[in-house]
Amino acid sequence: MSTSWIEHPGFYIKEEMDARGWLQRDLAFILGIPEQGLNMIFSGKRGISPDMAKALGQAFDVPAEFFANLQQAYDLAQAKEPNPEVAILGKMQTNYPVREMIKRGWLERTDVAMLEQQLARFFCVPNIADVPYMPHAAKKSSYEEREIPPAQLAWLFRVRQIARAVSAPKYSERSLRAGLEQLLPLMLAPEGTRDVPRLLMESGVKLVIVEKLPNAKIDGVCFWQDDTPVIGMSLQRDTIDNFWFVLRHELEHVLRGHGRDTEMVDVDVQAATTSEEELVANSAAVEFSVTPKFDSFFIRKRPFYYEKDVVAFSRIVNRHPGIIVGQMQRRLDNYSYLARHLAKIRQFVLPGAIADGWGQVLPISL
């Protein structure tokens, strides 16, 4: 129990009584309670309840808050000092979803000192003072200057961490371009996505799928480890159209050598952008997803886009209807349009992928 100069509220009640020349029985008479009730307060065995604070306020003609605050101040003074780790953990959790990172197996639940060491190793810096966004950081990091939010940054570093632990054959641009042709037949059905990780790996491209952290919107990322390209995807939208669009978007970054110096982090790959790198990647993704024939189909059928026509067109261009529907929704700005065709793909792609999340934790040591 901590010591303090703050007296029990009963002490101050006695002072108020003395100032008015009241005896204990006088106050008991005024309050309409037995003297024994006041004895418990004066001896410090009972505190002042909200009801008693109001009654005392009326008796002494002062605000009830005066007595309520006396009790609150006394209670706080008597309370035990919390573990010093509480404040440190509070600062850590404010900046990073540390609890979720522990839950996901990215960090181990240990004492604060060890947790700080883990966080530093997770972000590949010498010590906790160099971790981006931490309140005691020694200097502003490049990630802060690029305004990558902490939760997105933690996701990115998990992708990097996993990719480092995975070996891949030497990257070949020629093999990847040829592999794009092999991907086309896989777009006919959701089940086709299960072969994507293998085909990319054969070209020397690491595909790492990591479930996003709560409140961290992100579609994908492209970066390089030495001469090996890495694509990270979150599958935050579990639909066939989004999977293929994000994948082809990131593959275009790889083919053009984007992300060699700075990671290409994509929060919403289909959002409006003025970045040249993002524009070319989006253009490649649209052409790959729905083929150049889509524009003429869209114009020809305007303003009536019947389901039978969309399904027939998807068969002509060898695409799953959901891929066509996804682009139709964006063109029409109507995200309920034929939404039942947006098939789920996560259940097919995860088993054959390097994946972390959705109840699965990759055993990678810091």
Image (spheres, rainbow, N blue to C red):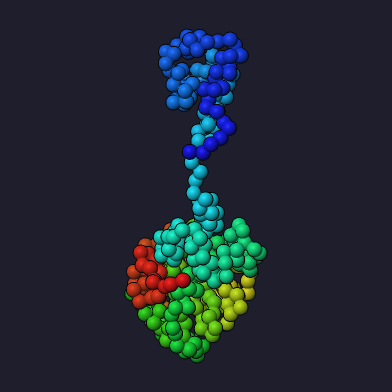
Whether residue 11 is visible here, answered yes or no, is yes
Q: In the rendered image, which quarter is residue 147 located in?
A: bottom right
Where does residue 90 sit, x and y in percent of width and height? Answer: 52, 52
Give the vertical position of 183 relative to 243 (above or below). below
Q: Nearer the viewer, residue 266 or 302?
A: 266
The x and y percentages for residue 210 are 44, 69
Q: Look at the picture and state if 204 lies above or below 17.
A: below
Q: Percent position (x, y) of residue 63? A: 58, 21
Residue 197 horizontal/vertical position (percent): 40, 79
Left or right: residue 208 compared with residue 23: left
Left or right: where 64 falls relative to 100: right
User: Is residue 307 positioned above or below 93 on the image?
Assistant: below
Q: Give me the residue at 40% from left, 69% from top.
A: 356
What residue is rendered at 44% in x and 83% in y?
167
**Residue 64 visible in the picture:** no
Q: Classify 14 as above or below 234.
A: above
Residue at (49% x, 21% y) in the render = 42
| Horizontal relation, residue 360 to residue 174: left or right | left
